[in-house]
């Protein structure tokens, strides 16, 4: 039996919130998807896996796959998602079709706790039934409501909470997707049912939860890496002078202005200070050591590359970014209107939630080079968590 896994990771995270979809968020020192791929790759007897991603997320996918060598050995080229989860899964199934799978397991990219035992049960159920999904008993009392009024109390004895991986004979589920009467079904069991197939349940796993909210992400991080107890704080400082231009780059955001900042790269004083703060927390040199201004390849480079490198240095040591905080000192431009955009962009580059980023600004009361509007200064602090030892 040729068993392939299809991982749905093209969502944009509307329920999760924040600028970065949850599958790319840092969790216990790596993107959440990396942990899901690690867990799947630990299961025996898989012929391969295909991840469905958003077309804009290819660099994020490559970074996540790079953190999971075992999954990389199984991975086919990613498929690109569609407008809905259902459309994305169909695209993935079409990408798998040339490999002629016998069984396909369709799994959520935001479920990092899938166990080899659950995968084995899924494969066995697909072989036996053709269409089967993992399910757990419902322990809470469930109510059907209209507005704020209860209209029914279903008997929970007949209810189940459905998980992934959902398991199917490949030809069955591909044909069901191709014949689906609509494109808004929320799981593949519904697609199978709509095609008239009897879809069975098998024993799920209460620990196989899906990361849906910020609190879920925090809980997943604590479960995956409960020992990030080495807390460090680093500081960074940077200054750039003004030159002729029409905009400045601050915190990864282009802000129209009557000058620009002079520098070898894009002269983003905020991201440069953050880099040095992170490198300082690691005892890992400074930005000039990692990206020498004497090297022509960094001329005009976006400073987002530098910050992403600093963050990756933390992750490579099994750690994570706990908080980033910057304080700009400038007379102009005004920072307030751009503060949240800067926080969102820094959070996106660092793979953390926006509530872990602080951006503040003050003037120099017309004192010194800043007061004379000759340039901008920035101070930054980075708090990182590393494993002990």
Image: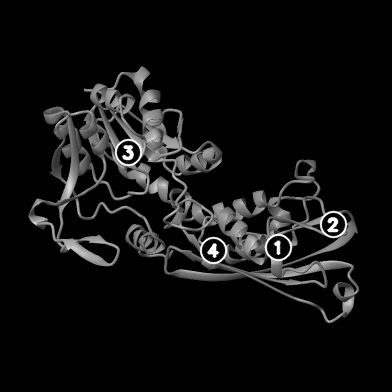
Kindly report which numbered mark, 4 or 3, lies closer to the viewer in this rendering.
Answer: 4
Query: Can you tell which quarter of the image residue 97 is in?
Result: top left
Report whether 287 appears left or right of 317. right
Query: Can you tell which quarter of the image residue 69 is in?
Result: top left
Please tell me whether mark 1 sits on a helix, a strand or a loop. helix
The residue wearing badge 2 is 260
The residue wearing badge 3 is 41
Kindly report which numbered mark, 2 or 3, lies closer to the viewer in this rendering.
Answer: 2
The residue wearing badge 4 is 354
For image coordinates 13% across by 30% down, the residue present is 129
For image coordinates 47% across by 47% down, the residue present is 12
Q: How far apart are marks 4 and 2 (CA)?
A: 27 Å
Q: Where is residue 139 in the image (x, y as percent from the top left)?
A: 14, 61
Quadrant where the image shows the C terminus: bottom left
| Mark with earlier residue (2, 3) | 3
| Mark with earlier residue (4, 2) | 2
The answer to whether marks 4 and 3 mark residues whose Cβ atoms lie closer than 8 Å is no
Q: How far apart are marks 4 and 3 (CA)?
A: 31 Å
Front-most of residues 359 and 264:
359
Residue 270, disc: 1
For image coordinates 51% across by 53% down, the residue present is 20
The answer to whether marks 4 and 2 mark residues whose Cβ atoms lie closer than 8 Å is no
For image coordinates 42% across by 69% down, the residue present is 229
């Amino acid at each position: 039996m040729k068993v392939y896994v299809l991982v749905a990771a093209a969502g944009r995270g509307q329920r999760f919130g924040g600028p970065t979809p949850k599958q790319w968020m840092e969790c216990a020192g790596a993107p959440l998807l990396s942990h899901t791929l690690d867990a799947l790759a630990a299961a025996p007897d898989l012929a391969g896996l295909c991840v469905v991603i958003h077309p804009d997320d290819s660099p994020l996918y490559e970074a996540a796959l790079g953190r999971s060598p075992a999954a990389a050995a199984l991975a086919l080229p990613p498929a690109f998602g569609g407008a809905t989860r259902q459309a994305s899964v169909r695209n993935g199934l079409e990408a798998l079709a040339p490999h002629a799978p016998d069984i396909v397991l369709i799994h959520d990219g935001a479920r990092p706790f899938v166990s080899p035992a659950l995968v084995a049960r899924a494969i066995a159920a697909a072989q036996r039934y053709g269409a089967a999904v993992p399910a757990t008993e419902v322990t809470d009392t469930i109510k059907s409501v209209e507005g704020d009024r209860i209209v029914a109390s279903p008997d929970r004895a007949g209810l189940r909470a459905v998980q992934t991986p959902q398991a199917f004979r490949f030809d069955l589920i591909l044909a069901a997707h191709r014949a689906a009467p609509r494109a808004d079904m929320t799981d593949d069991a519904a697609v199978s049912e709509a095609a008239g197939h009897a879809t069975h349940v098998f024993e799920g796993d209460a620990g196989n939860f899906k990361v849906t909210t910020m609190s879920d992400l925090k809980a997943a991080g604590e479960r995956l890496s409960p020992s990030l107890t080495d807390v460090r704080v680093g500081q960074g400082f940077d200054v750039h002078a003004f030159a002729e231009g029409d905009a400045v780059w601050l915190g990864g955001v282009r802000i129209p202005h009557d000058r620009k900042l002079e520098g070898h790269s894009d002269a983003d004083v905020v991201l440069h200070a953050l880099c040095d703060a992170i490198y300082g927390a690691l005892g890992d040199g400074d930005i000039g050591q990692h990206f020498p201004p004497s090297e022509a390849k960094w001329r005009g480079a976006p400073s987002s590359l530098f910050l992403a490198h600093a963050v990756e240095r933390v992750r490579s040591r099994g750690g994570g970014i706990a908080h980033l905080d910057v304080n700009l000192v400038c007379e102009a431009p005004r920072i307030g209107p751009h503060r949240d955009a800067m926080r969102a962009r820094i959070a996106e580059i660092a793979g953390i939630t926006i509530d872990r980023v602080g951006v503040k600004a003050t003037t120099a009361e017309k004192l010194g080079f800043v007061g004379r509007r000759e340039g901008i200064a920035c101070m930054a602090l980075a708090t990182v968590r590393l494993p002990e030892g």
